[in-house]
Structure formats: structure tokens, C-alpha cells
Image: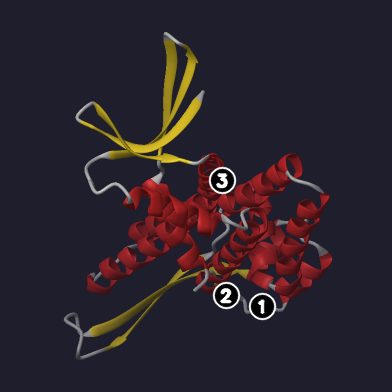
Amino acid sequence: MKTSVLGYIKNKEIIGVRSLTQDEYSIFEKAYSEIRKYMQSGELFTVALLNYDDFFQALDEYLDVFKEAQDIGKHNLDRAVLDLNRKILNYLCSIRTFLDHNETDVNRSYGKEEVKYFKKICADHYDNSFAYRFLYKLRNYSQHCGMPVGNLVIDAEKDNKSKSGKKVTISLVFDRDQLLSRYDEWKASLKKEISEMPAYFEIAPLLEEMMLRLGDIYLSLVEKLFPGIELEAELMLKLANEVNDVEAEVVVFEYVEETENKAQLTYKEIPLQQASWVLEDLKQLKV
């Protein structure tokens, strides 16, 4: 005989709250499994987002340093460019890892419809965005030709409202001619687009657009592969709210009576934190 019970563990004591019907337990099991799969699927998107944030945080930090410096010095500039390049390379690699892993996962775990859906999403972004096309191929460039960025541009002008008496802006730019001369594997159409860019063009707007497009791909995957994830996360929070003790470990027990003298007790902890993360993710992705 099998019995499912919502309860909690506190101070090594197991306390039951109420029994779950068979339907309730089946819904819980499915929600538990889907949230675990969702969290695993989102890890690589999170890595890309963290690398993106690292780059812009570093750019802001260098701006703070350089706007107060009287003499920046070539060594400091070279070091800043190297550091920012490193962060861009991390971001480029995480973009490709996210896209390649999801394509592999969809191929292995889902059907032809889902595979076609994923490929179409990516193809639409590729076709409709220079930033997507360019950064997708730039990773190959960086593997064969080294660092992708050409120059760090620092502009300063008088600003009496500033403590230093000047207003400083900082931007990282690509060297168009260097990109074209050092790499022969650009597709003809993309090569033409690059050749039509200014001699030096900023990277930040391209990185920003790419992150938005990755977010759209991720949200589209969530909607297709996890259509019930929002309701499943809300279910977990609802179950947890039935236990009026924030310090307790909320669980669902499964008690199996095998014989008159033998029984087995197992439990799954309700993924309260993960469910909250799911709802927060969906809120941010839908903005």
C-alpha cells in the first residue's frame, strides 16, 4: 500500500500535514520533474548572461578609473583592452555553447516538430540581425585569428559639473579592415555587410542586441518545451504555503507498506527556491 503525504522536517522530526490524492501526487511528480529539467536547460543561458554582465561591469569600472586619471598610460590601456577582450571571448563562447547544446538536447530529447521549431527560431534571428550573424561568426574568427577588438576609444570634454572637470566616455570598437584582412572565412554576404560598416564600429550595441535575441530564443524554447512551467512553479509555492513554518524543510513523503512488518519511507523536498527562480525568470524574459 502506498500513501503520499505533504509534510515537513524540522529538528530531525518528520511531521505530516495532509494526505495527497493519487492525482495530486501525480501532478506534483510531473511538476517536480519539469522544474528540474527547466533549471538544467537554463544554466547555459545564465552563463551567457553572466559573461555579458561581466563585460559591461568591467567597461563601467574602467570608465570610473580613466575619467579620474590625469595620465592613463599605454600600459594601462593595453591591459584594459586585453581584459575586455577576454570577457568578450567568454561571452562569444557561451553564446555558441548555449545554441549548440540546445540544438543537441532538442534533437535527443524531443521530436521532429520541436527540432524544426528550434532551427526556425535561430534562422529567423540570423536572417534578421546583423549583430546575430556577425557575433555568431566572430567566435570562429577569434579561434583562428586571435583577439577580435581593435581599439579602446576614450573621449574627454570639459564638464564643470564633474569633480574632475571633464566628462569621459569609453567605448570598445572593431577595426573593420583588420576583420576583413585577417580572416577569409566570412560568408560573402556577411563580408559585404562588414565592408559597409564604418572603419571603427562599436561592439557594445551588438552585444546588447545579441543578448536580447538569446533571451528571445530561450523564452521561445521555454514556451515550447515547458508549456506548463509557470503553473507548475506556482503549484510548488502553493503546496509550500500550506506549511506555516518558514524554517522547516517542506517535503512530500511517499510511504510504502511492503509487508506487515516492513515499510519504506522516501521523500522529495519541494523545490521552493527553484520555483521562485522560474517565476522570476519568466517575469524578466517577458519584459
Q: Image quadrant of residue 196?
A: bottom right
Q: Name which of mark 3 and mark 2 comes first in the sequence.
A: 3
Q: Name which of mark 1 and mark 3 comes first in the sequence.
A: 3
* Amino acid under disc 2: Phe
Q: Residues within 10 Å of mark 2 (few under 14, many from 20)?
A: some
Front residue of this view, candidates 262 and 284: 262
Residue drawn 56% across and 50% down? 94
Q: Element type at marker 1?
A: loop
Residue drawn 24% across and 49% down? 244
* Whole-percent x, y for residue 117 in the image: 76, 59
Q: Is residue 14 left or right of residue 84?
A: left
Do we see residue 81 in this rendering?
Answer: no
Which residue, as the protein is rendered here, is positioned at the far front? 260
Seen in the picture, residue 139 relative to 216 is either above or below; the reply is above
Marks 1 and 3, how far apart in space?
45 Å
Q: Are marks 2 and 1 in contact (CB under 8 Å)?
A: yes
Q: Which mark is residue 197?
A: 1
Do we see residue 28 in this rendering?
Answer: yes
Q: Residues within 10 Å of mark 1 (few under 14, many from 20)?
A: few
Residue bearing the label numbered 2? 201
Front residue of this view, candidates 6 and 58: 6
* Amino acid under disc 3: Glu
* Whole-percent x, y for residue 199 in the image: 62, 76
Residue bearing the label numbered 3? 34
Front residue of this view, candidates 71 and 275: 275
